[in-house]
Amino acid sequence: MQKTSDEIHWKRTTNLMLAHLAVWFFFGYIIHMFVNVLNQFTVPILKFPLGFYMAAQGSLIVFVVMLFVFAWQQDRIDRQHGVAEDD
Amino acid sequence: MATQTAERSDFIRNLGRLYGLYTGGFLAFIVLLAIMEQVGVPNRVLGYLFVFFTLAVYAIIGVATRTSQVSEYYVAGRVVPAFYNGMATGADWMSAASFVGMAGSLFLLGYDGIAWVLGWTGGFVLVSILVGPYLRKFGAYTVPDFMAFRFGGNFARFLAVIVLVCCSFTYVTAQIYGTGLIASRFLGMQFEIAVFAGLVGILLCAMLGGMKAVTWTQIAQYIVLIVAYLTPIVILSTRKYGVPIPELTYGFAIEEITAREQQLVKDGLATLCTAANCGPTTLKPHVTPFINYSPLNYFGIIFCMMVGTASLPHILMRYFTTPSVREARVSVGWSLLFIFLLYFSAPAYAAFSKLEVYTNIIGSNVASLKPWLFTWGELGLIQICGKNALNLDAAIAACKAIAGHPGVVRFQDFVINTDVIVLSTPEIAGLPYVISGLVAAGGLAAALSTADGLLLAIANALSHDIYYKMLDPNAPTIRRLTVARVLLFFVAVIAAYLASTRPSDILAMVGWAFSLAMAGNFPALVMGIWWKRATTTGAVCGIIAGFGLCLFYLVTTRYFPGMGVKYFGMTSLLNPLTGAPIVDIAKAMALPNAMESWPTLAHPLANKVGWFGLNNINCGLLGMPIGFLVIYVVSLLGKPPPAEMQALVDEIRKPRGKTVLEEK
């Protein structure tokens, strides 16, 4: 059965959602479960223990960048399927 | 109508210049006050000038942008550009808990406190990906609007209003409490009076102009709060390490703290927290994880704060104000960037002030304590040797009373309320008073801006959802807005009254609000958008089950801990390092007041019992999964929603086209 453009649009949107949720989960939780391992390393020059640094700054930077990337990617998907708003 | 549109876009185009001028004016004002301090104007006067000047500016913006048009009142006419909406969301989001409380918690908890930083930033990812833009396309005025439409009418609307009022009200009480704390310290007012004084500022903005006025005021408040937050640590960083970027240099401060911690233990001035003894008076190393929160509670807080972010109505409704779905998404990015500026600085704040305390207070002679300490001691917020530090003599006497006290301040002798850290850091570091005044103005901006947003969310739900949609659907515009304003006033007064009774600390109250929002809203919002098969019965049952369980856990552990232990099998929370119970249940239950209801925080069991060792801040962790499960199972048991509804869900998923709901 041929899928309509709307269906493909939603499929791609869902996949994008899942991909970003995976990144979110990794930097929000998984990486901090290994804080003791990471703390054995030190961030060069800045002298932070790595595990501490990832929680205090690293993950936050990832979240900010992720949001702008997501906005851009989702808009591209919308445009390719003709469901984006007029500029 | 045409002239009005032209006027509006003129205003929008000039936003950059207007706020640029405003920022310049504010900086000039700080410089002016700094000069006044040098020529000898007393501190009290500087404090008053700071607070009243900034309050006046907010009030002027509020009055100048007042409105009597319904769509401007509820969603600011949907014209706020992404960048500025991001800034307004930043102020809406960052409350007294972020500004005043967070660095203090990081000071106290070290690594474990970062759970709050992570939780309060990562949630915006969920807002953007799962919820926000879809609600913007739907075109509602309030979150309950969406629930009512998607889940068949007024019962779902009513439940959503209950969830909204519960979480927003808990949250707003914490903000007004913060306002009172700042005003009583810097203006020398009585705490209870200060609380009501803060209210006047809040009401002037929110009552007259609704969302429109609140938006333009919040942007002004963001500028004040971020300048105020960053200034002291930029100065400290420059002075100590020669680089004006504290976020890069506080790694050195942490290194020094760790060295100093070992020194204190070696000198016998502190007892290190070990598996055998890790009580509240022991020193817990700053970078060591999981000694204040168990891993379960650490990740629980992160998760609850993140999901709570994506469920809080006063945040979600900010994204109703953008001109398009696309801008709503970009706006979430800007929001987090502006919030990030403060949050990645908070650990630096904690590190710098901890280093100052460890080097200048602990280990120094009791007789040489600095006078600033006693202004906080008078408010009961700093204790030396177990007694409120009212003045130098009292502190010396208190320490003398301890047998074998060496005469220098030991680690366990110095207890500081976490809400004081940020407000007192300029004094701890010996900076000019003008910086203290600036920080107070910033804290006030943070508390007021969040309180504005929250009160508006509550009043909108009551006037729009309860009054207009449920009670009197034919009410004319004027009457709807009047009802909104009157309700706003009463809600604010009740919240101020509650705040003046000092219910708990700021961070705990805010944590509860997040968990309640998460358990009540998140499953229904996400399933409503992402699963067409979700039915009315499913959603209604899910909200009741999830929200009910969270509320039950919270109320039982806080107010009826005796009953929780006796009837619901609750046990003591555990010490994260030693695994030992933090209270002796058998002993506490034998006390005559064990079964007392509504106990004060001094009750031996209040907030200290639960299931699975789960802190009650994390009650959303119980409620949310149950909510999802119930919606899923009950929906599948019933008939699928009608085809028209499924078609409308499809509409929400496509940015193009008109909003689904056309409000008058």
Image (spheres, rainbow, N blue to C red):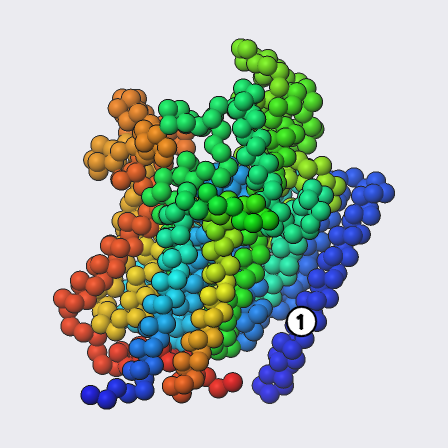
Q: Which residue is mark 1?
A: B16
Count neighbours of disc 1 (C-alpha within 10 A) and say few if under 14, some if 14 to 19, many if 20 or more.
Answer: few
Q: Position of residue B522 (x, y in %)?
A: 34, 60
Quarter of the picture containing the C terminus of chain B is bottom left
Q: As drawn, is B614 to the left or to the right of B310?
A: left
For the point 28% across and 27% down, the residue is B585
Chain of the residue displaying label 1? B
For the point 63% across and 35% down, the residue is B356
Please state which of residues B200 and B266 is positioned toward the viewer in this rendering.
B266
Q: Amino acid at mark 1?
A: Gly
Residue at far top of view: B403
Q: Position of residue A54 (x, y in %)?
A: 48, 51
Above/below status of B496 relative to B224: above
Above/below status of B168 relative to A47: below
Please state which of residues B121 and B472 is positioned toward the viewer in this rendering.
B121
For the point 49% across and 29% down, the residue is B283
